[in-house]
Image: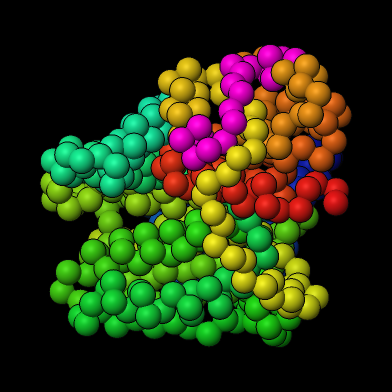
Amino acid sequence: AALRRAHLFLDSIVEHLPHMIFVKDAAELRFERFNRAGEELLGQPREAMLGKSDFDFFPPEQAAFFQQKDRETLAAGKVVEIDEEPIDTPAGQRWLHTKKIPILDADGTPRYLLGISEDVTERRRAREALERVHEELELRVAERTAALRQTEAHLRQAQKLEAVGRLAGGVAHDFNNLLTVIMTQASALTGPRNPDAKVRRAAEGIVDAARHAANLTRQLLAFGRQQVLQPRRLDLAAAIAALAPTLGRMIGERVTLVLEPPSTDGADGADGAGGAGGAWIDADPGQIEQVVLNLVINARDAMPDGGRLTIAVRDVPPVGAGRPGVALRVTDTGIGMDPETEARVFEPFFTTKATGRGTGLGLATVYGIVAQSGGSIRVDTAPGRGTTFEVVLPAAEAPAAAAEAAPPARTAEARGGETLLLVEDDPAVRAVLHLALRGAGYGVVTAHDGQTALHLIASRPGGFDAMITDVVMPGMTGPELATAARRRQPGLRVLFISGYAHGAAGDGPGPDDAFLAKPFEPTTLLRRVRELLEARAPGA
């Protein structure tokens, strides 16, 4: 009776265990015992299992694997643990963590094999899901890291270009002062009053060389975003269409020029880029023309054997809280660029052309003009598949109506008898401008800074007919001087001159102020002074 109670107690424990428990005889590996958890897992009543082997219930390969592990356990005479083994059940494939234990008799001979199997399918699935999440996270981290490195590279490139631009702008400003002196002095020797023809020709050569140098400084200032811009409302598509004949002559017969009609890139408007039938932007027409010409020349040179050059204007819808834009895309079918060339494409003086074929300032100029105009530029290129430059500029509202055409202005006389106040901190520039203005008949009073100029205005009862002032000066800028001078002499006409952009040293002249960019020739200065004097007084 006690033995039976002990058997019942042990049977009850085995039946209530949550893991599958089975016993096989050691000789033929046939099942001799199964608990309830085993029945539920395999979907078989224990009566159908007892006396049978694995080959009666499982596929041959799976049954052979089970019995191989059984015999390894019996031969070793110790526990064998199988971390994960698959098993086919009516509910589908399950994964078991199994311990196989040899049951030995008094002589140490294996008589039975005890198996304890825990269903670890859900644990395995959770682990696999975690591994997938981990792999996805690693992939995202790798992608973000690559994007961050690319952003860092772009930032370093932008910082490098910014530093070079500041250096170029500073050098160009000082150089413009020197060129103003050179052009003014040399121009004085080119006139008919000089009886020496050889001297005149030499002076003309000096002026011509100075003009070329002035063009280089303008490009440097454009790259450094210190170029003088005079923006106005402009239809980009119409401007490019007007340039088409010039572009056609530039690229030659071997390159086919295609001007795509303006269209939208998903914006709400249906009237073409910029809305209201035009691709409207606020930009300096001359600078935008430089952008187009430089991009077209670059595309032409990338197609030495000919090809197709496509210029397109597209609306760019706003991204997030950003403004809508107008995109200019210049695409060629040329040789393309490798990553090393692409990384340096906007650097000044970097060129892949042969010596003497280019200065390396074309795309640097484009970069500076676009950045100074509040836009952006990107490159899409690869060796052998051509290049696309995309310039995106802020979109502007279309003008309500075409402005009335102004009557043609008469040709201004360069000479005059008015009295001018000339304010310039550079003594060499001040001297040559004084000479040029006096030579044209004007009375000229000079000042080297703003305070001296204000003292002269206050001490002169009749005031001055106009003031010519540099924009960037120590102590007081030209615009600050103009504001203070007009409080002392209301309606004073002012012509600003500078080698810097507006606002390069604080507040610059307003868009309606008269401005003349250095370097300039004496004839240009005299014409602008005459136009200023004959214009309506401010506030009139």
Q: Nearer the viewer, residue 444 or 104?
A: 444
Say above or below: 326 vs 158: below
Say above or below: 414 vs 184: below
Report if residue 9 lies within the magenta region: no
Report if residue 441 lies within the magenta region: yes
Say above or below: 336 vs 19: below
Residue 47, percent from left and from top: 67, 68
Look at 62% across and 66% down and name the residue there: 409
Residue 314, percent from left and from top: 58, 74
Q: Nearer the viewer, residue 1 or 409?
A: 409
Q: Quadrant of residue 330?
A: bottom left
Q: What is the tally of numbered marks visible in this picture?
A: 0
Q: Is residue 219 left or right of residue 455?
A: left
Q: Nearer the viewer, residue 311 or 141?
A: 311
- Is residue 445 in view? yes
Look at 34% across and 37% down and name the residue there: 188
Q: Is residue 347 left or right of residue 396?
A: left
Q: Is residue 151 left or right of residue 324?
A: left
Residue 376, percent from left and from top: 55, 53
Quarter occupied by the N terminus = top right
Q: Which residues are magenta?
A: 437-455
Look at 73% across and 26% down and name the residue there: 481
Q: Is residue 493 left or right of residue 445?
A: right
Residue 270, percent from left and from top: 71, 85
Look at 38% across and 35% down and name the residue there: 184
- Is residue 119 in view? no
Colouring scheme, one of rainbow, by chain, secondary structure, one colour:
rainbow
